[in-house]
Amino acid sequence: MTINASVAFTIHDGTNEQFEAAFANTRAAFLADAGCLRYDLQKVRGSDVDYVLFETYDSEEAVERHKANPNLRVLGRALKSSLLSGPHILIMDPVGDHVALSTEADHPDS
């Protein structure tokens, strides 16, 4: 069963480069975890300070591996000075048909 999450953040004005770099520096480590299918940071259109992270996992076990990944603490420390609010986490289960999200570029060993 696929599990999706969206995580909303609002950052302090002017900290975009630092905030985005923190995700760029840890993204590959999260995607390398078995069962992590998507880990994509998005900037909210029309806002300089609002972001949403989209995550997709193939199982509850993959979510638990993500929570235990030491890079999550690394990311948290890197984000601390940028965050104004968040993370605001919403966990979702897909209904109906949905499109596969992973690509060979994200998972070269698949």
Image (spheres, rainbow, N blue to C red):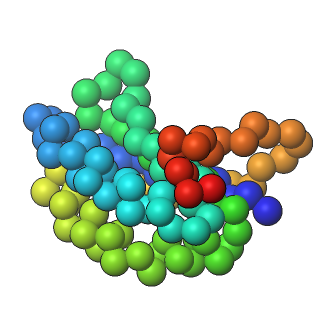
Closer-to-camera residue (58/87): 58
Q: Considering the image in quadrants, where does the C terminus appear?
A: bottom right
Labels in figure, total: 0
Quarter holding residue 27: bottom left
Q: Residue at x 26, y 34 (%)?
A: 49
Report x, y in % for residue 55: 54, 52
Residue 52 in the image: state x and y as whole percent.
Answer: 43, 42
Give the x, y percent position of residue 30: 44, 62
**Placement of 24 over or under 62, stated as above or below:** above
Task: Looking at the picture, tell me which residue is in the foreground, 65 or 102.
Answer: 102
Q: Does any portion of residue 9 appear in the rendered image?
A: yes
Q: Position of residue 99 (x, y in %)?
A: 75, 37
Look at 47% across and 63% down and name the residue there: 32
Image quarter in which the N terminus is found: bottom right
| Left-right relation of 53 to 61 | left
Q: Quadrant of residue 41?
A: top left
Which residue is pictured at 39% across the width and 55% down the height?
28
Identity of the residue furthest to the front in this view:
109
Q: Nearer the viewer, residue 74 or 101?
A: 101
Q: Is residue 70 above or below residue 100?
A: below
Considering every residue shown, the one lying at the far right of the view is 96
* In the image: residue 71, left or right of residue 94: left
Q: Is residue 5 visible?
A: no
Give the left or right position of residue 42, taking residue 16 as reference: right
